[in-house]
Amino acid sequence: MCLDVWGAASRNRHEGIQRDMESGFCVLSDTEDLQMLISNTATNLHNERSKTLFDEIRASINNYDEEDRSFWRPVLPWGGFFTIKAGRKAISSIPMYVKINLKNTCTIDGFLMILYVILRDNQSFPRELAVFLGKTFVEHFLYLMDSCDYTTVKMLWILDRMSRQQYHSEIHHAALEIDLFGNEHENFTKNLENLMSTVQESLCTNWSCPSRFQEYTNTTINISPPHELPHRDPIQSAVDEFFCTKLLLCSELGCNGLREFSQRVFCHGPPPFVILNMQQWKSEELSYVPYHLGLCQHRYVLEGATLFNKEEHHYSAAFQIDGCWMHYDGLRGNNLILLDKPPDLLLLSSLVYIRASDK
């Protein structure tokens, strides 16, 4: 009898603690949680580093060993764990520490790696990106990457950029487990605010059309493969199709007019970089990937790509520094490797281009 009572009390206490952890730490978009994360590094931001992580990677390219092309230490490894001191959830005035385990972070890792290289390799880009993501985010992101504090980098992205609905979290073995399994464009590209926002207007020729004027806004650039392979570059053709004027039959119910679409334009001017979602494309449609891209009357240069392994359901990334390509795969031991030729882009998930005038 006493054992039953004790067992029930123990279970109730465990469930109570679990509820406290879930209520306090599963909702990770709270301003308080983000401010706590930022405050841990804010005091060190004014200390300039003599050499950044980017400088080290660049130096390794210039001094690589033909027998070992990998960077000398892991960079942004898959997963991670983070510890929070939960003072406001303390029991009997004893501070409680909650461990956060991160899983399946490849849906943000590759883009975080490319984002870091882009920002460090282009002086004006951090200032431009700060307009959309905030100066505080950009400064802390660069500082944490240079400090090799990779789990905190991922937590910064999760807390500051992602909504609670974009990831799964649960209590597992007295730790909060955050699982980012899913699609990298959902977890990263769509969280870049209005960086790549475009607008296109349309007007129906039928004055009786129930919705004669329409406006279409997109926050991402999703290009579809052409129905027939064009004589010129298929990717450039698809981009042109996305931005060009067109004349189509009006789709409004009961309307037989023609709808004229204007040239699509960027809402906030040409962004420092663009991400093309290539997930609809098949390998046979990607026989050629352009190094230069004309995009809404602006010239862009290929900087990187993310790749998707269907068998492992795993993302990796490739990017270039000073014309040399590197492959990043957070799941591997030697996860940053210098390539002797451009990467195989048959398993392409996205292409990343930077504005050419700044390179």
Image (cartoon, rainbow, N blue to C red):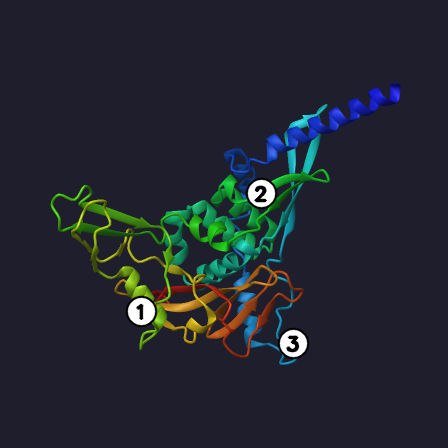
Disc on res. 300: none
Report the Cα–Cα distance between label 1 and label 2: 38 Å
- Asked if disc 3 and disc 1 are in contact, CB closer than 8 Å, the reply is no
Residue at the disc numbered 2:
168
What percent of the width, then of the height, locates residue 359?
Answer: 37, 68
Determine the secondary structure under disc 2. strand
User: Of 231 and 34, which appears nearest the observer?
Assistant: 231
- Quadrant location of residue 43? top right
- What amino acid is at disc 1? Ser
| Neighbourhood count class around disc 2 (C-alpha, 10 Å): few under 14, some 14–19, many 20 upward | some
Q: If you read the primary sequence from the N terminus, does the residue marked by circle 1 or circle 2 appear first? A: 2
- Position in image of residue 110 (x %, y %): 53, 59
Q: Residue at x 39, y 52 (%)?
A: 129
Residue bearing the label numbered 1 = 237
Q: Earlier in the sequence, mark 3 or mark 1?
A: 3
- Label 1: few (<14), some (14–19) or many (≥20) C-alpha neighbours in 10 Å: some
Q: Position of residue 145 (x, y in %)?
A: 55, 55
Along the viewing direction, whichever of 170 and 207 lies nearer the viewer: 207
- Image position of 16 (left or right of 214): right
Q: Amino acid at mark 3?
A: Asp
Left or right of 326 in this view: 213: left
Asked whether, in this view, residue 196 is left or right of residue 98, the answer is: left
Q: Quadrant of residue 262?
A: bottom left
